[in-house]
Amino acid sequence: MSVHTARRVFPPPPDAARALVLRAHPLDDSFNSALADAWIDGARSGGARTRALDVHGLVFDPALRTAHRAATPLEPDLQRVQAAIAEAAHVVVAYPVWWGSVPALLKGLLDRAFQPGWAYARGDGPLPDKGLRGRTGRLLLTMDTPVWYDWLVYGASARRQVQRATFHFAGIAPTRVSCFGSIERTTPAARAKMLCRARAVGLAEGRALVRRFGASRPEEVA
């Protein structure tokens, strides 16, 4: 089943103040994971329901072996990811920038889970129709280079890959970005400020979800 012939089964628009957080750093004690947790804490304080999935704890083949020329059944964990995205009104991805790109398993998850016919499908125009409209996004990026250097020299490639080429392409828009640079050289005080910033962003976005959909009962992180 190619991208041109995939059966269109788009998820329905979200109907509640739910947020999904994909943690994509392999280490639970990483600063990137701490930023994800800070965002979750803020969003819950803002009244949004949150669910978190650890990408490196999922079991799936990250290789897109058929290049969408034939249908490939999704493993149970990728089905969980699709279901979580479908019910979420806001999708957050926390990941480190490695070699100007995203961690390999995150790339594999995006390749496999964002299937034609589900995340997008061929339309009448030059670009595919967006299957995940009605959802917004947030990226939490960490890197050892200064943020300005990543923009000037690398063109913010790891950000653009997810924000524009994946999320916006599939209809998750707007997707806003929080970049945290020079991580290896930061002081404890500087990191504390970064965590406060991530929590403040989560609080604001949690409140925005509640304004849009109404209050929901907070749930535990999955």
Image (tube, rainbow, N blue to C red):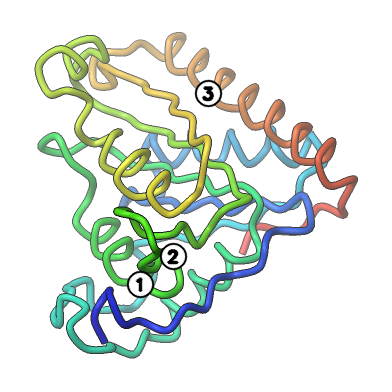
The N terminus lies in which quarter of the figure? bottom left
Marks 3, 2: nearer the viewer: 2
* Image vertical order of residue 203 relative to residue 26, above or below: above
Q: Amino acid at mark 2?
A: Ala
- Count of labels in the image: 3
* Image vertical order of residue 98 relative to residue 69, above or below: above
Which is nearer the eye, 109 or 128? 128
Residue 196: image quadrant is: top right
Q: Which mark is residue 171?
A: none
* Image vertical order of residue 78 relative to residue 152, above or below: below
Category of crowding for the residue at label 3, using alpha-carbon neighbours closer than 10 angstroms: few (below 14), some (14–19), many (at least 20)? many
| Residue occupied by mark 2 | 119
| Residue occupied by mark 1 | 116
Is 184 on the left or on the right of 114, as rendered? left
Which is nearer the eye, 175 or 218? 175
Label 1 residue SS: loop
Q: CA distance from mark 3 to mark 2?
A: 32 Å
Label 2 residue SS: loop
Label 3 residue SS: helix
